[in-house]
Image (cartoon, coloured by chain):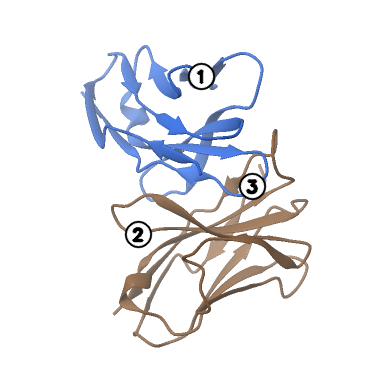
Chain colours: A blue, B brown
Amino acid sequence: AQSVTQLDSQVPVFEEAPVELRCNYSSSVSVYLFWYVQYPNQGLQLLLKYLSGSTLVESINGFEAEFNKSQTSFHLRKPSVHISDTAEYFCAVSGSGTYKYIFGTGTRLKVLA
Amino acid sequence: EPEVTQTPSHQVTQMGQEVILRCVPISNHLYFYWYRQILGQKVEFLVSFYNNEISEKSEIFDDQFSVERPDGSNFTLKIRSTKLEDSAMYFCASSAGTGSGNTIYFGEGSWLTVV
């Protein structure tokens, strides 16, 4: 069985400061890992994903995440956040042999001016 | 950019009533999904659908739930007799395939309130 843990339910951070949103997973099979973002009153949008290959993946808006197999983590980072990054961020895991994604409980990022 | 669209965006219904949530997946996608998110909780998988049949479902997806692709474009979720605990945001999603490289695209959700 697969599971995802997002330890931080809320993360307040000042504008232009760095941020890390933590995600740990457990799985008995090879994993695919995802970060989705949900802006207020909108649906889930894919931010970035790890399928295979390079363990560091990047999004077009400056976020990056690193797949760490030994620590079973896929933390999301951004070196300098903007007010517009305020949203809820969900980590998800999938794997071979299943159609479904398992989501974490989400982390609410609030960027303060 | 193609997107998954859902209707209604918000529905209030009385306990015991039937509800149908509608979705138009991305046009060239073959796999369809419903997820739900109870307020303050995680997004949970309900069901996946491929080639006009259910390919996988969770324990949440009991006999009260059904899915259908009535024509070439719509994908519906029916709840036969709603309960208070069915109140949630329901997300429809679609993908071109499964496994590595096949990203799931989500709609904006249908918020169901059962009173």
Q: Residue at x 33, y 20 (%)?
A: A20
Lateral position of residue A17 relative to residue A34, left or right:
left
Residue type, label 1 = Lys
Residue type, label 2 = Ile
Image position of B46 with respect to A101: above or below? below
Residue B12 is situated, as x and y percent measured from the top left of the image, at 36, 76
Estimate how packed mark 1 is, as few (under 14), some (14 to 19) or many (20 or more) residues with alpha carbons within 10 Å: few
Q: Residue at x 51, y 68 (%)?
A: B61
Lateral position of residue B62 relative to residue B1, left or right:
left
The foreground one among B77 and A23 is: A23
Image position of A28 with respect to A105: above or below? above
Q: To which residue does mark 2 refer?
A: B38
Estimate how packed mark 3 is, as few (under 14), some (14 to 19) or many (20 or more) residues with alpha carbons within 10 Å: few
Q: Mark 2 and mark 1: span between their CA atoms? A: 31 Å
Mark 3 or mark 1, which has the lower sequence index? 1
Q: Residue at x 31, y 14 (%)?
A: A18
Q: Nearer the viewer, mark 2 or mark 1?
A: 1
Residue type, label 3 = Thr
Q: Which mark is residue A98?
A: 3
Q: To which residue does mark 1 refer?
A: A69
Residue B78 is situated, as x and y percent measured from the top left of the image, at 54, 77
Q: Secondary structure at mark 1?
A: loop
